[in-house]
Image (cartoon, grey):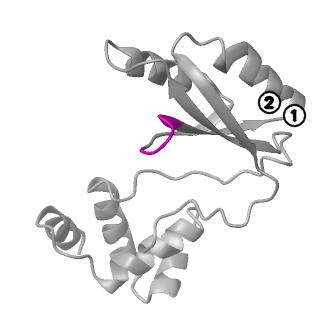
Amino acid sequence: MGCAVLWRLAHGTRMDRFDNAILAALQRDGALTNAALAETVGLSASQISRRRAALEAAGVIEGYAARLSAAKLGHGFRAVIRVNLRGHGQGREEDFARFVAAQSAIRQAFSVSGDADYVLDVRTRDLEGFADFVHRHLLPHPQVAQVRSEIVLRTLKDDGGVPV
């Protein structure tokens, strides 16, 4: 079974309903055992094990992580920041990318089309921590020309996964 999954993925064919069911279940709860997956999906634990290993080997499953409560861990303040750079080329994007990678407050960062060059998802403890991040780290960066922020008042949806 595992070899069949790898073959299908390598040849650009679709995964079957069992592969999709495994992925959907793991996306909901990455800590599921093969036995629990077997009950959910309707295959034996050994078949699940082979398919899961093949999905991991093919890079479809990139890893496993726990979803943590930012609020309960003291990082309940969230903002979305749109950033425009002073210019492009000559290593400016790479310099900004290194800066972004080094900032723990930046949880996600995207290069985007539209009226901004980048969109950042930022988490801090509170408004004061956010102001500190913006004024002491982001605005002084030599590549940053403009920053526009939106404070997240309420999260309506945060699936974080991929439709399966």
Which percent across, then down, holds residue 87? Answer: 42, 18
Q: CA distance from mark 1 to mark 2?
A: 5 Å
Q: Which mark is residue 130?
A: 2
Label 1, secondary structure: give it: helix
Q: Quadrant of residue 145?
A: top right
Q: Is residue 117 magenta?
A: yes
Label 2, secondary structure: give it: helix
Q: Is residue 88 magenta?
A: no
**Figure quadrant of the C terminus:** bottom left
Which percent across, then down, holds residue 39? Answer: 52, 86
Query: What amino acid is labelled 1 in the image?
Result: Leu
Which region is colored magenta? 113-118
Q: Residue drawn 78% across and 46% down? A: 70
Q: Is residue 68 above or below residue 139?
A: below
Q: Nearer the viewer, residue 7 or 96?
A: 96
| Residues at circles 1 and 2 in contact by the CB criterion of under 8 Å | yes
Q: Is residue 25 above or below residue 66?
A: below
Residue 33 visible within the image: no
Query: What amino acid is labelled 2 in the image?
Result: Phe
Which percent across, then down, holds residue 63? Answer: 46, 51
Q: Nearer the viewer, residue 134 or 116?
A: 116
On the image, numbered disc 1 is attached to which residue? 127
Residue 160 visible within the image: yes
Q: Residue drawn 48% across and 20% down? A: 96
